Image: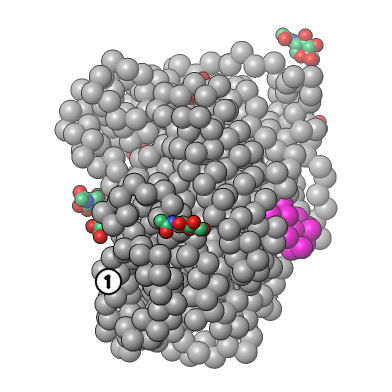
Amino acid sequence: MVRLSLGIALAATLSQTVSAAPINDTEAAAAPVAVSSSFLGGLFDFLDTANLTVTHHEGKLYGCKCSPGQLCWPSQSKWNSLNTTVEGKLQVHIPPAASCYNQFVGPLGTVNTYDAAACADVHANWENESWTVEKPGAALWTYFTNETCRPTMNPSDTCTLGYYGVYTITATKRAHIKAGIDFARRNNIRLIVRNTGHDFIGRSTGAGALIINTHSFQDISWINKYSGPGSYTGSAVTIAAGVQGRTILSAGHAQNPPLVIVTGECPTVGVAGGFIQGGGHGPWTTLKGLSADNVLAFEAVTASGHYVVANEQQNSDLFWALKGGGPAAYAVILSVTMKTFPDVPSTGATLYINDTHIGYDNDKYWNATTIFHKYATHFVDNGLYVYFELFPFTLRARPFVAIGKTVAELEAITAPMFAELDALSIPYEWTPKSFPTFFDLYLDLFEDEASGGSALTGGWLFTRDDVTNNNDGIIDAFKTVFSPAPGVFSFIVGHLFNPGYGKPVSNSATHPSWRNAANFVITVLPVPIGASKAEKASLQNVLTNTIDQALRDSSTSGATYVNEADPYQPNWQSHFWGSEYPRLKQIRKKWDPLGVFYSIATPGTEDWEVIQDTRLCKKL
Ligand SMILES: Cc1cc2nc3c(=O)[nH]c(=O)nc-3n(C[C@H](O)[C@H](O)[C@H](O)COP(=O)(O)OP(=O)(O)OC[C@H]3O[C@@H](n4cnc5c(N)ncnc54)[C@H](O)[C@@H]3O)c2cc1C
Ligand SMILES: *[C@@H]1O[C@H](CO)[C@@H](O)[C@H](O)[C@H]1NC(C)=O
Ligand SMILES: *[C@@H]1O[C@H](CO)[C@@H](O)[C@H](O)[C@H]1NC(C)=O
Ligand SMILES: *[C@@H]1O[C@H](CO)[C@@H](O)[C@H](O)[C@H]1NC(C)=O
Ligand SMILES: *[C@@H]1O[C@H](CO)[C@@H](O)[C@H](O)[C@H]1NC(C)=O
Ligand SMILES: *[C@@H]1O[C@H](CO)[C@@H](O)[C@H](O)[C@H]1NC(C)=O
Ligand SMILES: *[C@@H]1O[C@H](CO)[C@@H](O)[C@H](O)[C@H]1NC(C)=O
Ligand SMILES: *[C@@H]1O[C@H](CO)[C@@H](O)[C@H](O)[C@H]1NC(C)=O
């Protein structure tokens, strides 16, 4: 039996098994576009960037990142020297469930991995978010890993790497992040940044990649009176890259007086990683805007390997782009400084309407859902945030969040909806409850979710105008989501909020339609384990062209959310960023002109694609 963490033995095995892959490439021939630099060694000096590898594929010419097994792949001694620079934090990446298999057949070689105790731990924790977050490269939503190494009771099955990265650096210092970026740039290696692994669409994993894990950055420092550039002089907090939502809210609760920031509803999502680079919405969003709207400064390491501060004065273009302009596209964030707010007594509630109440009466279900959704605009205009799920015969709104409001105030806001439900004799269960602080509500009413599931996800943002003018059309689109094709089922996770209410000073790189939001939904389309390539393509087609198309058609002034959307949707540029897109693309070109970073459907990645299943390439 060989334990999972057998890095050294593995490295020894690997160096013997590496051989040139049968790929028709011209090594080191595609020179990167020349990038001028004002001074050598400066922020925009990319002269040490390795050339892409020229590849012919389906009659087209590509410049590719180097893949394991190719002659251009760095020698063992180069990897060892990187490991020395990062003080031993470099590991060959083995998927978490490899311990349930006799062998892991990786791109660098084959190793024995079976370990009964470790495998039992895998089975016990596969759906445990926190356990998965702690793994250096694991994805919580596994579809985009290619599902090649799930827990098994049959050790003779084969565990392969799928679309996971090849090496991880568990960075604990700024210098480790710089070393990883420099190594990837100088050796033409695909680079991935991974914080909590929550990304729905595989942006924190990638075949052939070196992964920099930022989750160990856990510092939190409170600022009584912000004195950086800009007019804001209130309280703030600097949060290191790896801190998760519940961690920062717990730390804020321990302050005197208790403080909050705008985090996600999800306790385990990070704050300063992909979340804020997508915009970041949560229970405080209706009152205080998106998380990105609340940023005062970032610290980051650039594609050229330089440490920078970005705020209103310094590197202000980068500052703006990092606030919602797309994850892992401009720099690696080390920390974010955000506004804080005093916590306040709040009211939460749950609303259930399901078969317990209405049986399997389709009319009652859709009438109830139509009424609930019609009030989205009214709720957000009155300062509420509501997280809800829609399945056939199940409307589960848990929770309604009324920050700073009493039970009586929440009852008054919701009374017209209940009057309509009552008029149709639709039963429901409604349980409001007051809490001494928002944080108490958050711990009580928000739930951890399961990891390890295989699904495609899409989504759409419905504006206030869309809900006002076409609620029935939106509900028809929801019906399509439930049964988009024969034998196919998908469901909805929704969030009623409006980042425009309460007039947050929005100067972030998010789609202007957010400022008029009423409901943002995620569509979830489960994918059977073991689906063939053709079955996956067919489900992807259903998501893009039936499910999300129905939502788009019902809501013409809407948008999509960078972090919770189908990456293959048409016109992702304008759906994600609207009129902000051209400026973001320019900023990308300035800060990462040669594509050191890559995550799917982010500014400036139009020419990049994965070919031959695992190779990240640029069309030449
Ligand atoms: C259960 C669940 C609940 C969620 N709830 C919410 C919610 O309430 N509100 C909301 O807005 N979103 C929510 N999301 C979506 C969330 O915003 C995205 O999954 C986001 O990508 C998570 O960012 P992360 O850094 O934690 O995750 P990761 O998967 O580690 O990273 C996501 C992306 O960010 C990049 N990245 C990570 N760290 C850095 C860094 N330091 N510098 C540069 N790039 C970096 C990665 O390369 C990747 O592209 C939820 C997701 C899940 C799975
Ligand atoms: C490699 O690609 C080139 C250009 O398409 C082609 O001429 C050549 O025959 C290919 N070589 C092999 C070994 O496939
Ligand atoms: C990149 O390509 C250019 C032009 O073909 C060549 O002159 C240069 O030496 C190459 N650089 C590397 C590091 O291979
Ligand atoms: C990096 O060094 C550490 C400490 O010496 C070692 O445990 C690890 O296996 C090394 N990683 C690789 C990929 O060789
Ligand atoms: C989930 O994993 C974390 C981290 O490994 C662990 O502390 C926790 O106890 C686990 N939860 C459950 C329910 O097993
Ligand atoms: C990904 O999965 C498909 C099956 O859906 C398989 O054909 C392909 O070989 C896999 N690729 C990798 C790199 O795991
Ligand atoms: C239906 O609602 C009841 C509360 O009335 C709740 O206990 C139950 O879990 C709900 N069922 C579903 C499937 O959500
Ligand atoms: C639902 O609403 C429709 C009108 O939109 C009505 O005809 C029908 O009777 C209602 N069903 C129930 C169960 O109330």
Residue 170, above or below 532: below
- Whether the magenta-drawn stretch holds residue 582 is answered as yes
Q: Which amino acid does label 1 sit on?
A: Thr
Q: Is residue 382 left or right of residue 406?
A: right
- Scheme of colours in the image: one colour
Residue 480, above or below 258: above
Name the residue beneath numbered marker 1.
Answer: 431
* Closest to the observer, 255 or 536: 536
Residue 106's spot in the image, x, y percent?
Answer: 43, 23
Q: Give the range drawn in magenta.
A: 573-587
Q: For ligand 2, which image quadrant applies?
A: top right
Q: In this view, does 577 lie to the left or right of 502?
A: right
Quadrant where the N terminus is found in the figure: top left
Q: Identify the residue at image location x=55%, y=47%.
A: 458
Q: Is residue 188 left or right of residue 208?
A: right
Residue 578, above or below 128: below
Magenta stretch, main secondary structure, is: helix
Q: Identify the residue at image location x=81%, y=42%.
A: 33
Residue 225's spot in the image, x, y percent?
Answer: 48, 90
Q: Quadrant of residue 294?
A: bottom right
- Whether the magenta-drawn stretch holds residue 274 is answered as no
Residue 409's spot in the image, x, y percent?
Answer: 38, 86
Quadrant where the C terminus is found in the figure: top right
* Closest to the observer, 344 or 303: 344
How many marks are shown on the rendered structure?
A: 1
Q: Identify the residue at image location x=54%, y=54%.
A: 475
